[in-house]
Image: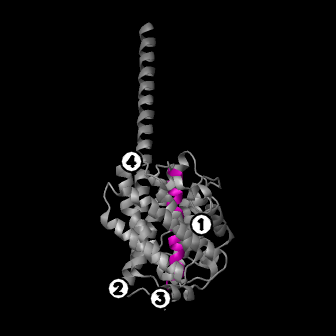
């Protein structure tokens, strides 16, 4: 019995379906209350009663967040044009490929390990091996080879998604996990195509990814790890609530700040879990490769959100400097007027 068989047996509730998603990001408007959001993000070291916090409002946040993503079966997401040629500048493309080629390779491996259907299982292993071969021989001249390979991987993932959607049992893969890894692939392809993401879109994408990760952790920890499971579940809901709100103007800076705070707290939780798994002090069905995979993405989310926060801070400083200069000019003008008036008298 492999780890994914155990995963299914340990899934105590269907609540993991809250982590379902739908694809590439498209803006949507929801409620706005940044001050209440900051209050909502509590320390992960002090989990509260889950029965009180897992209310209908929290689940509404998941629905609102999911509705802000395009359906996975949108023709635009699978069009051949998206996988034809890298359009981003070489340095940007190389950075994305260096990170995501490994993640996508591991996606194929996870599906291979968790699927019992022989044909789908075989496809997963073949794609994993091909991604590893690409990574081994990757250079600036071979970067474009990632696109047709990624297109094949997307088709494979969508076959898994659609088969699970039909109700056919093919193995020990959560439908939400299959959708989650398609969403990450679509984001990667957007980056290679130079698709511009607003700060709000970028933050909302990573909030969704982190919310999913926390929800998965809640299902994969041993039932005896109750406190950690509750922490993961509550964190998933809090992050979804942050991302489901609308943010504009000054609230955008607060959105980035709160999301970064939540990402760092989740990263602390994930790293603690990672250490516990490797030292055998945390009981779970999480494979070491999977927790490393999640920690790696959490680290990247922090790096990206930190850069966005730095941009916002620079903008605020510039605004303050400009305001101060205007005030100084006004004060100097007032002083000159007073001097002129005094001279007249």
Q: Give the numbered dot on residue 279.
A: 2
Circle 4 sits on which residue?
89
301 vs 289, nearest the viewer = 289
Circle 3 sits on which residue?
2
Q: Earlier in the sequence, mark 3 or mark 1?
A: 3
**Vertical arrangement, residue 344 with respect to residue 125, above or below:** above
x%, y% of residue 65?
61, 62
Disc 1 to disc 2: CB gap under 8 Å = no
**Vertical arrangement, residue 110 with respect to residue 133, above or below:** below
Q: Earlier in the sequence, mark 2 or mark 4?
A: 4
71 vs 241, nearest the viewer = 71
Q: Is residue 37 magenta?
A: no
Q: Earlier in the sequence, mark 2 or mark 3?
A: 3
Query: From mark 1 to mark 2, how far is it between C-alphas?
Result: 33 Å
Disc 3 to disc 1: CB gap under 8 Å = no
**Which quadrant, please, contains the C terminus?**
top left
x%, y% of residue 233?
55, 75
Q: Nearer the viewer, mark 1 or mark 2?
A: 1
Circle 1 sits on which residue?
21
x%, y% of residue 341?
46, 12
Query: From mark 4 to mark 1, how far is it between C-alphas?
Result: 29 Å
307 vs 345, nearest the viewer = 307
Disc 4 to disc 1: CB gap under 8 Å = no
Look at the image and give the residue range highlighted in magenta. Answer: 199-222
Query: From mark 2 to mark 4, how far is it between C-alphas?
Result: 42 Å
**Residue occupying the point 38% across, 88% down:** 280
SS for dot 1: loop
Disc 2 to disc 4: CB gap under 8 Å = no
Q: Residue furthest right?
A: 56
**Vertical arrangement, residue 158 with respect to residue 77, above or below:** below
């Amino acid at each position: 019995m492999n780890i994914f068989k155990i995963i299914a047996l340990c899934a105590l509730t269907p609540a993991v379906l809250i982590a379902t998603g739908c694809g590439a990001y498209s803006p949507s408007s929801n409620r706005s209350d940044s001050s209440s959001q900051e209050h909502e993000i509590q320390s992960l070291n002090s989990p509260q009663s889950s029965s009180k916090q897992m209310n209908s409002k929290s689940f509404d946040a998941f629905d609102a967040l999911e509705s802000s993503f395009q359906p996975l079966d949108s023709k635009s997401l699978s069009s051949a044009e998206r996988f034809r040629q890298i359009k981003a500048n070489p340095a940007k493309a190389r950075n994305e490929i260096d990170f995501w080629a490994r993640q996508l390779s591991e996606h194929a491996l996870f599906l291979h390990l968790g699927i019992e259907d022989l044909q789908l299982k075989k496809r997963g292993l073949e794609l994993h091996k091909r991604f590893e071969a690409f990574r081994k021989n990757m250079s600036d001249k071979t970067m474009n080879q990632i696109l047709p390979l990624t297109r094949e991987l997307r088709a494979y993932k969508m076959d898994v998604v659609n088969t699970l959607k039909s109700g056919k049992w093919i193995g020990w893969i959560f439908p939400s996990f299959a959708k989650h890894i398609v969403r990450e692939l679509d984001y990667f392809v957007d980056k290679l195509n130079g698709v511009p993401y607003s700060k709000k879109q970028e933050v909302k994408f990573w909030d969704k990814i982190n919310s999913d990760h926390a929800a998965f952790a809640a299902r994969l920890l041993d039932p005896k790890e109750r406190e950690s499971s509750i922490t993961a579940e509550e964190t998933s809901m809090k992050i979804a609530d942050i991302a489901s709100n609308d943010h504009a103007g000054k609230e955008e800076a607060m959105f980035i700040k709160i999301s970064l705070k939540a990402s760092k707290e989740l990263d602390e939780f994930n790293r603690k879990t990672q250490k516990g798994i490797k030292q055998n002090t945390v009981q779970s069905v999480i494979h070491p490769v999977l927790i490393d995979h999640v920690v790696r993405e959490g680290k990247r989310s922090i790096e990206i959100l930190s850069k966005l926060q730095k941009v916002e801070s620079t903008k605020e400083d510039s605004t303050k400097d400009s305001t101060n200069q205007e005030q100084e000019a006004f004060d100097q003008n007032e002083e000159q007027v007073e001097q002129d008036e005094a001279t007249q008298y």
